[in-house]
Amino acid sequence: MDLLEMFHHGKLILPEKEADFGEIAWSNHPTFKGVELKHIITAKDTEGKFSYHLVRIAPGCSIGNHIHETQTETHEVIKGSGRCVNAGSTIPYKPGIISIMQAGVPHEVTAASEGLYLFAKFIPALC
């Protein structure tokens, strides 16, 4: 079983909550076409302290240039490839890469021909 399959069949386990990733639906990103999100844990579960999301970017699609004014964002690349432009520097994305975007820093992510899967974490919570 590859890493992506492990995430598809994974679980979030906390002392007070358990969530099976396979039971969480993918939702379309409200702004970026070809980008889908699985909200693993959100602000309502963490009193706004953090949120975790699986992100699926279709081949050739992008999360366009944007800024999170108050959140630090971390990407862990699970599968696929692409690139991230973080504060003007281009970072090649492939499995095993971790990238951190500081609050207030512009960034964007583009998937290569096989698409891209990320585990994204936000502190404080994005949603």
Image (tube, rainbow, N blue to C red):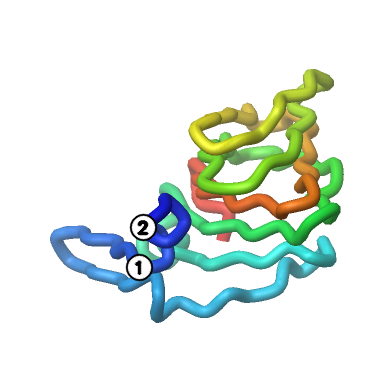
Residue placed farthest to the front in the image? 1
Residue lying farthest to the top in this orientation: 89
Residue at 51% in and 51% down = 125
Question: Along the line of sight, which residue is nearer the eye, 120 or 48?
Answer: 120
* Percent position of residue 35, x then y: 73, 63
Depth order, front residue of 10/88: 10
Image quarter in which the C terminus is found: bottom right
On screen, residue 24 versus residue 74, left or right, reads left
Q: Amino acid at mark 1?
A: His
- Looking at the rendered structure, the secondary structure element under dot 1 is loop
User: Which residue shows up at 51% across the image and 49% down it?
Assistant: 119
Q: Are marks 2 and 1 in contact (CB under 8 Å)?
A: yes
Amino acid type of the residue that numbered disc 2 sits on in the rendered structure: Met
Return the residue at label 1.
9
- The percent position of residue 50, horizontal first and vertical second, equals 44, 49
Q: Dividing the image into 4 quarters, which one contains the N terminus?
A: bottom left
Q: Earlier in the sequence, mark 2 or mark 1?
A: 2
Left or right? Give the position of 21 relative to 38.
left
Q: Circle 2 — which element?
A: loop
Determine which residue is flagged by label 2.
1
